[in-house]
Image (cartoon, helix red, strand yellow):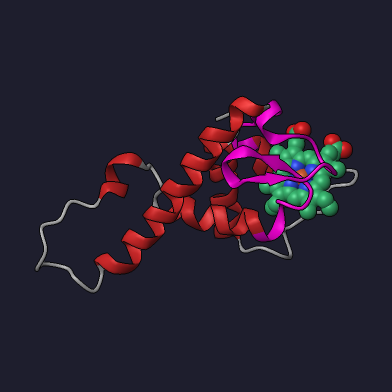
């Protein structure tokens, strides 16, 4: 488990850099040629940043996902089961057992984003 700590810190830092870079790049569109380090070190896209937010607000309390820095224990560890996008989407839409359905809570776009986010980041 300790081995996981460094990658978590790095990915959180990369995510923070990615968000910061997104926030500032719109206001300084052309004047500076400074290379944004986040774009080379992080694969965070607008969609996955959105998925990350949806995950943090709706899933993190119950699920462990290293990339999101969450350690919920109610549902399965998503890093361990590393589900593909369709599998995440199916349970998020319909729920199962102790897992609530999110069809009436999240928009379809949010469900797509969080499913892609989990599928992309689980097990990493
Ligand atoms: C209230 C706690 C809770 C919340 C909130 C929650 N889950 Fe779950 N989740 C569970 C439980 C419990 C299971 C196991 C369900 C079962 O198999 O009976 C589960 C199972 C899963 C699985 C495994 C599905 C499979 O095929 O085995 C995935 C993927 C998943 N959840 C993703 C999510 C995502 C994404 C969110 C946020 C949109 C979320 N969960 C929110 C409790 C939760």
Is 1 situated above or below 63?
Answer: above
Instruction: Name which residue lies at 65% across and 44% down.
Output: 89
Nearest the camera: 92 or 1? 1
Instruction: Name which residue lies at 52% across and 42% down.
Output: 9
Give residue 32's quadrant in the image.
Answer: bottom left
Nearest the camera: 27 or 95? 27
Q: Position of residue 67 (x, y in %)?
A: 57, 41
Residue 69 covered by magenta stretch: yes
In the displayed structure, does residue 12 sit left or right of residue 91?
A: left
Q: Position of residue 123 (x, y in %)?
A: 60, 28
Nearest the camera: 104 or 98? 98
Instruction: Name which residue lies at 29% across and 68% down.
Output: 24
* Visible residue check, residue 91: no
In the displayed structure, does residue 73 sit left or right of residue 109?
A: right
Question: Where does the magenta region start and end?
Answer: 57-86
- Give the farthest residue toward the bottom: 27
Quarter of the image with the N terminus in it: top right
- Give the farthest residue toward the right: 97
Instruction: Name which residue lies at 76% across and 53% down.
Output: 61
Q: Position of residue 66 (x, y in %)?
A: 62, 38
Which quadrant does ligand 1 occupy?
A: top right
Report the number of numbered marks. 0
* Visible residue check, residue 104: yes
Give residue 122's quadrant in the image.
Answer: top right
Quarter of the image with the C terminus in it: top right
């Amino acid at each position: 488990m300790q081995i996981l700590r460094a990658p978590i810190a790095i990915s959180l830092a990369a995510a923070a850099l990615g968000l910061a870079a997104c926030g500032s790049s719109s206001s300084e569109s052309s004047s500076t040629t400074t290379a944004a380090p986040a774009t080379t070190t992080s694969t965070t896209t607008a969609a996955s940043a959105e998925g990350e937010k949806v995950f943090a607000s709706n899933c993190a309390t119950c699920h462990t996902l290293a990339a999101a820095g969450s350690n919920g224990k109610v549902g399965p560890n998503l890093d361990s089961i590393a589900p593909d996008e369709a599998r995440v989407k199916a349970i998020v839409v319909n729920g199962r057992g102790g897992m609530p359905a999110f069809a009436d809570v999240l928009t379809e776009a949010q469900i797509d984003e969080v499913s892609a986010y989990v599928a992309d980041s689980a097990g990493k």
